[in-house]
Every structure is written in C-alpha cells, then in structure tokens.
Amino acid sequence: MQGMSLIVKNTTRLVAGFIALFGIYIVLYGHVSPGGGFAGGCILAGALVLIVLAFGEEYSRRVLPHGIAKTSDCLGALAFLLVAIAGYMAGGFFVNFLDRGEACTLFSAGTVPISNLAIGVKVGAGLFSVFLALAMFRRSGERGAGGLLSPRSAAHNGDES
Amino acid sequence: MDPVFILMVALFVFMIIGSLIAVETRDLLSSVICLGAVGFGTSVAFLLLGAPDLAITQVVVEILVLVVLVRVVITRRDETAATGRGTLATGSVLLVMGVLVAVVFWMLASSGAGGLQVRPFGDPLMNHEGPASAMAPADQPQLAAGQAAEPQSIGGAYLKHGLLGTAVSHGTGAANYVMGIVLDSRGYDTLGEATVIFTAIIGTYAVLRRIGRQSHAGHVADR
C-alpha cells in the first residue's frame, strides 16, 4: 500500500493531529460533556485509518506499530476490568471508590474518567487493528491483481459488477 | 406544529428513501453511499431528540464503517448475479408479520380484561414509582419543611442524586449524566458491551490471521 496523491498526503499531515487531539479531548472530557470513551476511541481509530489510507501501511507502522495496537487493545480491556474489580476496596464490584471531587471539572466523578480512558484506548486500538486485519486480508487475496487499488478503480470495479 | 416534529418526519422520509435505494440499486458503491446517508440521517435524528452522546458515536462509527466498506469490501469483484426477488410475495409476508406483531403487542399492552398489563409504549419501567429509591442517602433524614420529597422512581433518583457525589449519597458526580449512568450506576452493562467488542475483534483476528492459516488445511489456502 503506497498511499495516495500528494494533495491527500499534505492534507492528512495538517489534519490528522487535530483529529487525534479531538479524540483525546472527547475521551478525557467524556464525564463532563457529551462524548465518552467509545466515541473518542472511534475518532482516534479514524485518525489512524486516515494515516494508513493516505501514507500507506508501511508508514503507519512508524506511527503506531501494529503489535502495540493489539497489545493496547487487550490492556484497555484489562484496565477497565481492573477498575471494576478495584471497587471491592469500597465494598463491591463497580463501586465508585475514588473521591467524587467538584462536579463539572476534569478531575471529578471518581472512577468514571478512568473507565473512559480505558475504553477509549481499547476501542481505538481495537478498531484500528480490525481495519488493518481487513486491509491485509484483502491484499493477500488480490496479490495477482496488482496489489491495492485506488478508490478510483474501486468505483470502476463497482460499475462493472 | 412543532418544527422539530416536521424535521423528524422529513428526516425519516429521507432515510426510508435512502435505505430503499441502498437495497434496490445494482451498484455496490451507490448502495454503500446510500447506507452512509441513512446513517447520517440517524445521527441528526439523535441530535434533534436530545441525545448528543449517541449522535457523536453514530457519526464516527458511520464514517469508520463507510471507510471499511469502501476500502475493503467493494473492491472485491462481485460475482453474484441478480435474481428476481418476488416483490409481491415478500411484501405480503412482511405485511402479515407486521400486522401480527401489532395485534400481539396491542393485546399484551391493553390492561383490560385478559390483558397482561405490559407497560404501555413510551412509559418505561424507569418511571415506575417503586416503594423506595435505590440511590437515596443511606441515613434517610426526616423531611424538613419545604424540602422536596424523595423521588419514587429510578429515573427520578438518577436525576436528583446524579450530581451530588458525596460519601452519603450514591451519586456519581459526573456532569454528563449519561456517562455517569453508563460507567458507574450501570457499569455491568458497559463491561458486557466491552466484552462483546473485544470478542468481536479477537474473532476477526482469528478468522483473518495469516500466521498458521497456510500451515494446516491446504484447501483453505488455495481458495
């Protein structure tokens, strides 16, 4: 996968960082404003998918190695479970054992932002891994047809069928 | 008439037309694009109904799914040939099933003689006035003069105690009530959802992996 044209690459260079930043904001402020771990994680995965589409799969390994994506997927799920189990310190499963703090601020609501963070990491890395797995599967399936096709020829194929 | 209602009706008509085109068109790319239009219509509908959390999630997931569909699915050559669908037969079966479901629901929901007294549509169990609210403070003080009474339903208790977050009250302290309920009051739900997603991702890996796929079962690798 060699990526797309220069225009797409330059636009991606400008935009991808801001998309990732917005995703992180949505994850961190999920307990104050609309959003949350799942939505923010999806936005993070979208930024990574954009990098893969624009620069190619080889370049994306430098941004986020695929092994780390798989590992952080599992670690996010484990962290969420640990937050739930840590509730036993206060008496039960999923008990909010931390100080609630002042409402409407970043450090409030006890375990809710920690759970959001875990879910965000888990969903972002997981969806990115799924996209990579599907893309690699397609490449191995169409090796005889000249590797990955651009979206232009994708539309062409759609017309033929 | 309420302008939001008119907007919703227009949106629903738009979404129905989009899904009909997505089903009926021959071109896979057009079908996927119509699917995206339906998804964005759903997102705007969520926004109009006052659910910004769902609207954000819907937009983002829709974009990701569209990218995956366009990039991964469409470029594979479609070898299937179109066959007749039997519109009349399918339509009549769907109509009969719809009428059946409506009649069964009406019979169950009617609280008259013979009815099973299922809660009516639009009045969920969360509004049910129970004997005591689950989230009330542990040491229930006597009501002072002019103090509002404890809400007697679960939904009301969420709204009353959600932002308190003291050691006495069982509130979450999250300003976003939805996140407080999803991640604290009903954390089991979210843990189950996360497990579902995790299992789906692991399953995708197991099906699509390259390592070990060719070593055993050569007929799979030849396909």
Image (cartoon, rainbow, N blue to C red):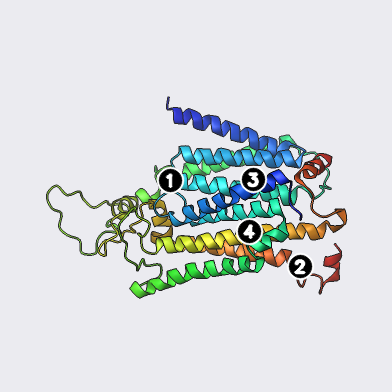
Q: Nearer the viewer, mark 2 or mark 1?
A: 2
Q: Is residue A140 above or below residue B31?
A: below
Query: Please, which chain is the residue tagged with disc 2 on?
Result: B
Residue A99: % across, % down = 32, 65
Q: Are marks 3 and 4 in contact (CB under 8 Å)?
A: no
Residue B50 image-quadrant placement: top left
Q: Which mark is residue A128?
A: 4
Q: What amino acid is found at the position of numbered circle 1 in the picture?
A: Gly
- Circle 4 — which element? helix
Q: Amino acid at mark 4?
A: Phe
User: How far apart are the alpha carbons under marks 2 and 4?
Assistant: 17 Å
Front-most of residues A132 and A89: A132
- Location of residue B99 by image quarter: top right
What mark, if any, has residue B115 been given in the picture? 1
Visible in this render: residue A36?
Answer: no
- Secondary structure of the residue carrying tag 3 is helix
Q: Residues within 10 Å of mark 4 (few under 14, many from 20)?
A: many
The residue singled out by tag 3 in the image is A11
The structure residue drawn at horizontal position 65% and vertical position 53%, both measured from the top left corner, is A51
Q: Nearer the viewer, mark 1 or mark 4?
A: 4
Q: Nearer the viewer, residue A90 or A28?
A: A28
Relative to A77, say whether B13 is above or below: above
Q: Earlier in the sequence, mark 2 or mark 1?
A: 1
